[in-house]
Image: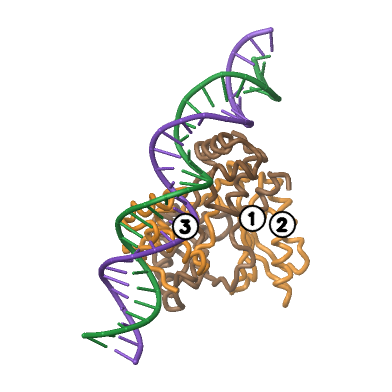
Chain colours: A orange, B brown, C purple, D green
Amino acid sequence: MTFDALDARLLLLLTDAPRLGVLECARRLGVARGTVQARLDRLSADGVLTGFPPELRLDALGYGLTAFAVLEIAQGRRGEVAEELAAIDEVCEVHATTGQGDLFVRMVARSNDDLQRVIDEVVGVSGVRRTSTSIALSTPVAPRVRPLLERIAQG
Amino acid sequence: MTFDALDARLLLLLTDAPRLGVLECARRLGVARGTVQARLDRLSADGVLTGFPPELRLDALGYGLTAFAVLEIAQGRRGEVAEELAAIDEVCEVHATTGQGDLFVRMVARSNDDLQRVIDEVVGVSGVRRTSTSIALSTPVAPRVRPLLERIAQG
DNA sequence: ATTCTTCTGGGCAATCTGTCCAGTAACGTC
DNA sequence: GACGTTACTGGACAGATTGCCCAGAAGAAT
């Protein structure tokens, strides 16, 4: 399973103009339409490209607060805890990590009160020992893949 | 600027079938084509919907390691540091947070050696005081917005 | 009651999609 | 070197979709 510069250029193109048609991509990349189609099919089939989820500004949706929590979990209950966390709507991301903390959680909320409620819900999950949370004040670098793609595309 | 259930249902639809056409969306939502078009235009214009970036499995791309770093920054140099971090390709996300740590960084790497290099680069940024890093062992909940949308869509 | 905004349902020309195909270039193998 | 495999090109086709426009209906606000 390979991923060459053309794949990267294609994905960059779709990053910039997501709802672009296959034909237009082919034109801009200077290759035949079938090639673009084949690449997209292959990337999807190989599981490299898992989709094109909409990118939303959550604050415009009413969820203006983002917070992080580091959870320390009781011995051997990590999987179980992770599952319960996944059931909380406001929990947008969970990682198991090395270090003193065991689980790292990203969550969102509508207001301070709402955040309080969400945090209570998170730390209230059975098996959670110690927690420490912090609030995101700003996001200088929003989630991105672009630089990596550009490198592969021979930027 | 509102965001109603139809908007949410539309975005859920596009989440599941990203490269779906406008007409097909209209059919599945049971509304006129023009409505779907208008909603998408409005969401984009309002800045709620910022795009449809490709969702990639970075490990399939060679970047199999994800690590997090909490950086403590010298007084008043946060913005400056954030800018330098943004210039590092492997840095995929940066948040300014409350708490003892000042900046929270997510980064990726190809291998342990590579991660070492990336970490060195990150902590080597001038203005970075103390750092603590940890590695993501697994990701029980990958970044998601779905539950929030479903709630708005009247789930 | 009147005005605005939004949605509907339809029509139009131009474009795109999915799907074929044959020819050609590139690559590894024997 | 000869051969087989794989990927890309360029072109064809019918059918579907897009962008755009419009008049009328339905609701909400004044």
Measured Cα–Cα span from mark 2 to mark 1 = 9 Å
Does mark 1 fall on the same chain as mark 3? yes
At mark 2, the secondary structure is: loop
Kindly identify the amino acid type of the residue bearing the numbered disc 2.
Ile
Residue underneath mark 3: A144
- Whichever of labels 2 and 1 marks the residue nearer the N terminus, that label is 2
Q: Residue flagged by tag 1: what amino acid is it?
A: Met
Tag 2 and tag 1, C-beta contact below 8 Å? yes
Q: Residue D24: x and y, percent?
A: 62, 19
Q: Nearer the viewer, mark 2 or mark 1?
A: 2
Q: In this rendering, does residue B88 appear at all?
A: no
What chain letter is assigned to the residue under label 3? A
Q: Which mark is residue A107?
A: 1
Q: Which numbered disc covers residue A88?
A: 2
Q: Quadrant of residue B119?
A: bottom left
Badge 2 and badge 3 both on one subunit: yes
Q: Which mark is in front, 3 or 1? A: 3
Cα distance between the residues tagged 2 and 3: 25 Å
* Residue in front for this viewpoint, A131 or C30: C30
Q: Quadrant of the N terminus of chain B?
A: top right
Element type at mark 1:
strand
**Marks 3 and 1, the one that precedes in the sequence:** 1
